[in-house]
Image: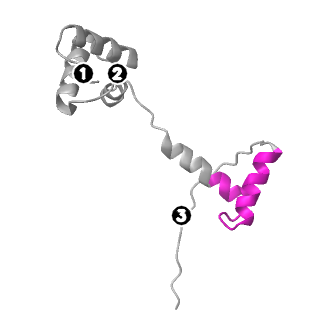
Amino acid sequence: MASKSIQIRKPSRMAGTKMTAAEYDKVQALVDSGLYLNVSDFMRVAVREKLDSIEIIKLRDVDYKTAKKEVLAYYEKFREAYPDEAANDLGIPLETAAKITSELIKEKRLEVIQ
């Protein structure tokens, strides 16, 4: 008796999109060159790549004093970083991280590297 492969189907949704004729022609040229099975295959790959490239940052509810301690510890750990990196990694608003970074520079607890 031959064994059969079983695959669980995941629920899917259909999403249509409009594009310019020039965009469609470029996609069709990629399909014609064999890079994609069809236009739908291109669209699925494009959507997956875009979703993989986006990082959703969840902000935490943290008081300013705690955030300042965390930002300072972040810079001590990584030695060099931009305020947006600290904000993203710590889950605090960018404006808060930038304000804290400026304060720490004024307090001479951080320095700007040229």
Instruction: Find disc 3 in the rendering and name its residue.
Output: 8
- Identify the residue at horizontal 53%, vertical 80% (top origin): 4
- As helix, strand or loop, the secondary structure at mark 3 comes to loop
Furthest residue toward bottom: 1
Question: Callout 1: few (<14), some (14-19), or many (20+) C-alpha neighbours within 10 Å?
Answer: many
Residue 86: x and y in percent read: 31, 26
How far is disc 1 from disc 2 in space, using C-alphas? 9 Å
Q: Amino acid at mark 3?
A: Ile
Along the line of sight, which residue is nearer the eye, 26 or 7? Answer: 26
Is 31 drawn above or below residue 91 in the view shown? below
Q: Which mark is residue 71?
A: 1
Is tag 2's residue or tag 3's residue first in the polypeptide sequence? 3
Residue 67: x and y in percent read: 26, 17
Along the line of sight, which residue is nearer the eye, 10 or 21? Answer: 21
Q: Is residue 88 magenta?
A: no
Count of marks, rendered view: 3
How far is disc 2 from disc 3 in space, using C-alphas? 39 Å
Residue 95: x and y in percent read: 39, 14
Q: Contact (CB < 8 A) between labels 2 and 3? A: no
Magenta segment boundaries in residue numbering: 21-44
Closer to viewer: mark 2 or mark 3:
2
Q: Is residue 26 magenta?
A: yes
Q: Amino acid at mark 1?
A: Val
Closer to viewer: mark 3 or mark 1:
1
Instruction: Find disc 2 in the rendering and name its residue.
Output: 92
Q: Contact (CB < 8 A) between labels 1 and 2? A: yes
Is 21 drawn above or below residue 95 in the view shown? below
